[in-house]
C-alpha cells in the first residue's frame, strides 16, 4: 500500500493521519487515495498507449460514482455486468461507445436498455441470450454490436470462487456450441458480430493462461474471419493479479500489456481489456476501531468494528489483507497471534486468522486493512442490520466524503410498515 505511511509512530494516509480521518468520519470507513488511483489509471493508459486499445474498467470492483468519474475522465471505458452498472457508468460520464456489457444472465429489460443506450458491445454468453437479443434487435429495428464471450476451458491458478475460465464454470459460450452459434447468427441480421471475448478469472499472477487463451481465441477468430465476419476487436478480459502480501509476486501492468498487445497485433485487431482489481485495489483501505480483546486458552480475539458484511473477501475467498495498527501505547511491544474478528454473528466473520500483531494493541486503537479498494465497499451488505459504510476520497491533505454512512431510516426505507 503506497499511500499509507508511518510518521513519528502515527499512520498517515496520503497527508492525513488516520486518527484525524477516524475522528472526522467515524469508523469503520473506506478510504481511497486519489493520488494512487490516478497513478494506476495513468499506468494503464501509458502501458497500452502504443496500441489501439479500449480499457474498460470492471465497475463491479469498486463502483462509487465519484471514483468512476475520476477513472472515466481519463478516457477509460466500462465493463459492466448489470443494468445498474450501465446506469452508473453513463451517469459518471462514460460514453456509451466505451461500455461493454458482460454477464451470464442478462434479462430482456437489461438487454433492451443496453440496445437503447447504444453501447460498444453486448458480450453474449449463451445461445439463449443470442436468441433473446436477436429478437430484441429485430423488434427495435436497430443494429446491435455484439461480441461472443467464449469459455475456452482454461484453468488459471487462482481461488476456485474467482476462476471463470474452465468448462466447469457457468461463464461464456462453450467451445462445442460455437458452430450452432454461427448458424443462429445468420438468422439475426441485426446482430453485428464485432468481437470475441474471454475472461479467465481474477487475481491471476502468471502469464501462461492468458497466452493460451490468446492462442485459442485467435484460432476461433481466424475461422470466423475466413467465413466473412467483419471482426474488429478481441477482448481479453481482466484478471491481472496484484500483491496482497509482501512476498506475493504479480506481473507488472507493462508486462501484462505486452502479452495482450502481442495477441491482438498478430490479428491486427483492436484490443479491449477489462481490468478491475488491478486498477483500484491498492488505492483503498478500510479503517476500523478495536472494540476490545478477548484472550482465551485457545485464542486471542481482536474484536474490531468492521465485519464480513463490510469486507467479504476473507470469508468468501479466504483472502489475505495486510493489517497495520495505529497504537495509542507507543511503548515497545512484542508479537502476539490474533484472530481479527468483527461483531457479526457468524463463525465465518473474520478479517484475519492467526495474524501476528503487537501485544499492546488495545480498545480504541485503529487498524488499517490494506488493499481494500477492490471488491470491498461494492460487495458490502446490510447483514445483521449493520449500516453500509461511508467512502472517503483523500487527496493530499484534503478529504471528501463521497458516500455518506447509511442511516437506519435508509436501511429500512423500502420495507413496508403494514
Ligand atoms: C469481474 C470481471 C472483470 C474484472 O476482473 P478483475 O480480476 O477485477 O480484473 C473483467 N471482466 C469480467 C467479465 C468480469 O466479470
Image: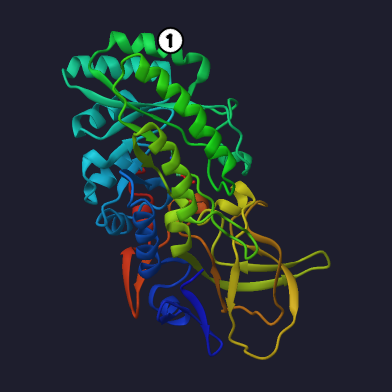
> Within 10 angstroms of label 1, few (less than 14), some, or many (20 or more) residues?
few
Query: Which residue corresponds to the image point at 43% horizontal and 10% vertical from the top-left?
Result: 180
Q: In the picture provided, is 346 more to the left or to the right than 236?
A: right
Residue 372 point in image, percent of width and height: 50, 60
Query: Residue 97 falls in which quadrant of the image?
Result: top left
| Quadrant hosting ligand 1 | top left
Q: Is residue 242 above or below residue 208?
A: below
Left or right position of 203 against 99: right
* Residue 381 visible in rendering: no
Scheme by which the image is coloured: rainbow
Q: Which quadrant of the rendered structure holds the C terminus?
A: top left
Q: Position of residue 327 (x, y in %)?
A: 59, 83
Horizontal and vertical percent position of residue 261 = 41, 43
| Observer able to see residue 414 | yes
Residue drawn at x 38%, y 18% is 224
Q: Which residue is mark 1?
A: 180
Q: Is residue 316 above or below residue 307?
A: above
Comparing 152 with 363, the one in front is 152
Residue found at the far left of this picture: 141
The residue at the far right in this view is 297
Count of numbered circles in the view: 1
Image: 97 above or below 140: below
- Image point (50%, 48%), residue name: 240
Q: Is mark 1 within 8 Å of ligand 1?
A: no
Q: Please provide percent x and percent y for residue 153.
A: 57, 27
Residue ID at (63%, 59%): 248
| Closer to us: 304 or 15 | 15
State the SS at label 1. Answer: helix
Amino acid at each position: 500500500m503506497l499511500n499509507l505511511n508511518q510518521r513519528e509512530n502515527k499512520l498517515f494516509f496520503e497527508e492525513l493521519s488516520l486518527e484525524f480521518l477516524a475522528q472526522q468520519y467515524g469508523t469503520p470507513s473506506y478510504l481511497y487515495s486519489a493520488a494512487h488511483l490516478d497513478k494506476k489509471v495513468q499506468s494503464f493508459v501509458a502501458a497500452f498507449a502504443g496500441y489501439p486499445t479500449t480499457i474498460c474498467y470492471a465497475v463491479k470492483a469498486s463502483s462509487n460514482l465519484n471514483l468512476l468519474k475520476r477513472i472515466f475522465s481519463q478516457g477509460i471505458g466500462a465493463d459492466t455486468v448489470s443494468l445498474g452498472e450501465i446506469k452508473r457508468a453513463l451517469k459518471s460520464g462514460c460514453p456509451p461507445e466505451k461500455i461493454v456489457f458482460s454477464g451470464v444472465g442478462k434479462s430482456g429489460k437489461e438487454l433492451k436498455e443496453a440496445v437503447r443506450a447504444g453501447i460498444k458491445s453486448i458480450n453474449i454468453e449463451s445461445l439463449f441470450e443470442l436468441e433473446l437479443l436477436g429478437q430484441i434487435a429485430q423488434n427495435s429495428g436497430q443494429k446491435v454490436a455484439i461480441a461472443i464471450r467464449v469459455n475456452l476451458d482454461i484453468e488459471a491458478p487462482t481461488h476456485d470462487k474467482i476462476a471463470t475460465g474452465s468448462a466447469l464454470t457457468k461463464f461464456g459460450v462453450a467451445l462445442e456450441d460455437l458452430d450452432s452459434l454461427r448458424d443462429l447468427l445468420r438468422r439475426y441480421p441485426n446482430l453485428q458480430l464485432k468481437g470475441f471475448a474471454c475472461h479467465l478469472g481474477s487475481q491471476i499472477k502468471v502469464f501462461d493462461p492468458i497466452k493460451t487463451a490468446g492462442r485459442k481465441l485467435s484460432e476461433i477468430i481466424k475461422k470466423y474471419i475466413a467465413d466473412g465476419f467483419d471482426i474488429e476487436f478481441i477482448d481479453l478480459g481482466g484478471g491481472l493479479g496484484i500483491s496482497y502480501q509482501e512476498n506475493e509476486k504479480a506481473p507488472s501492468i507493462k508486462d501484462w500489456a505486452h502479452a495482450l498487445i502481442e495477441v491482438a497485433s498478430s490479428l491486427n485487431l483492436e484490443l479491449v481489456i477489462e481490468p478491475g482489481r488491478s486498477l483500484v485495489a491498492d488505492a483503498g483501505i478500510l479503517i476500523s476501531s478495536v472494540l476490545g480483546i478477548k484472550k482465551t486458552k485457545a485464542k486471542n480475539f481482536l474484536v474490531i468494528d468492521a465485519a464480513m458484511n463490510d469486507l467479504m473477501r476473507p470469508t468468501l475467498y479466504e483472502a489475505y489483507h495486510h493489517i497495520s495498527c495505529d497504537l495509542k501505547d507507543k511503548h515497545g511491544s512484542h508479537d502476539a497471534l490474533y484472530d481479527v474478528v468483527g461483531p457479526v454473528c457468524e463463525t465465518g466473520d473474520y478479517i484475519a486468522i492467526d495474524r501476528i500483531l503487537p501485544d499492546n494493541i488495545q480498545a480504541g486503537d485503529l487498524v488499517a486493512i490494506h488493499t481494500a479498494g477492490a471488491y470491498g465497499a461494492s460487495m458490502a451488505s446490510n447483514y445483521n442490520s449493520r449500516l453500509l459504510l461511508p467512502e472517503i476520497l483523500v487527496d493530499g491533505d484534503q478529504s471528501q466524503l463521497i458516500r455518506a454512512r447509511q442511516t437506519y431510516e435508509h436501511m429500512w426505507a423500502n420495507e413496508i410498515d403494514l
